[in-house]
Amino acid sequence: MKLDNNRGQVGIGTLIVFIALVLVAAIAAGVLINTAGFLQTQAEQTGEDSTDQVADNINVIGEVGEVADSSDGSVGLSENKIFETTLTIQRSPGSSEVDLSGLSIQYVGDNGFAQLTHVSEQKDAIDSGSGGGTSAATNVYFIQSVTAETPGDPVITADGDRYEIVIPTGTVVRKVSGPTTEVRDTTGGGGSKVVANGFYGDGSDVVLDIVTLAGTAPVDIVDNSELSLLDEGQQAELEITTDSGATRNVVITAPDTFVGKGGDTVTL
């Protein structure tokens, strides 16, 4: 038998190629792991945001309007109209906390359109007008607590919390003297006319006391005159957006007649 003494050898070139392949594979694996982790984080964040936009919402459980009493000698309206809309709300089932001072409300009426923010967002405007100037908060809503674990807080924290969103329409709120305020209609021309007295006194809002902010009287502290007074049978559409992006659409409809309703609260 003839023995073959030839032996296989691994050259340095082959070894370099092998090491290079291992390094490329390791780098590729690292990139894939990092990409997978990034995509997972992004997917989780997108899922949380989508859940918040659906779940962190409010439900409107009541809608009423305040009708001016034209039979009252102090009221200058020629006919009864709704000058204030109130929505009673609660948080949606499964919703987390909802900050009501961070709502954005798009108001579209028969004769008016505006984007409403909470009155506290325009505190500087009210303060500047309190020195006798002409500045006032414009296109605002108020928040009032009905029943809540923390009545002085605008955040809905429990399923049993009930709040009211109050929207003055077609009017200005004026501080007359001391703690006295009045609501005036400015939409009819010929100067403003008193619609109601004392509707926005102390505690008118769970966050902002508009009476103490405006120190000099008389001065307009809130101006919602861009929103028309609601007449008989008229409608307005509201799109309420929370700070998480969830939306709630509401349609309010005034009764077909206000006969005998002057000075009353009517269901919308």
Image (cartoon, rainbow, N blue to C red):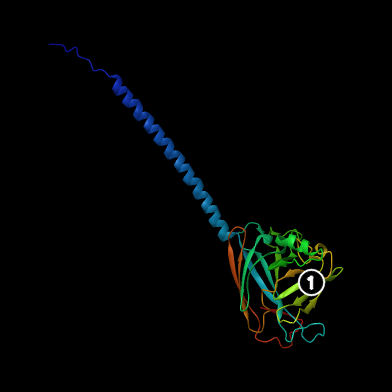
Q: Secondary structure at mark 1?
A: strand
**Pick the front one: 159 or 109:** 109
Point out the residue furthest to the bottom here: 259
Q: Residue at x 81, y 69 (%)?
A: 201
**Pick the front one: 234 or 195:** 195
Point out the residue furthest to the left here: 1
For label 1, count other residues whose C-alpha is less than 10 Å away and answer few (under 14), some (14-19) or many (20+): many
Q: Position of residue 73 (x, y in %)?
A: 82, 85
Q: Position of residue 25 (x, y in %)?
A: 37, 33
**Pick the front one: 69 or 171:** 171
Screen quadrant of the C terminus: bottom right
Residue 148 seen from this side: no
Q: Is residue 4 above or below residue 77?
A: above
Q: Is residue 146 above or below residue 21?
A: below
The count of marks equals 1
Q: Residue at x 51, y 46 (%)?
A: 41
**Amino acid type shown at disc 1:** Arg
Q: Residue 192 falls in which quadrant of the image? A: bottom right
Q: Position of residue 27 (x, y in %)?
A: 41, 33
Q: Residue 62 falls in which quadrant of the image? A: bottom right
Residue 98 seen from this side: yes
In the image, taking residue 159 as reference, residue 197 lies left or right, namely right
Q: Residue at x 29, y 23 (%)?
A: 14
Q: Residue 199 falls in which quadrant of the image? A: bottom right
**Pick the front one: 188 or 101:** 188
Q: Position of residue 140 (x, y in %)?
A: 69, 67
Residue receiving disc 1: 174
Q: Residue at x 34, y 30 (%)?
A: 21
Screen quadrant of the N terminus: top left
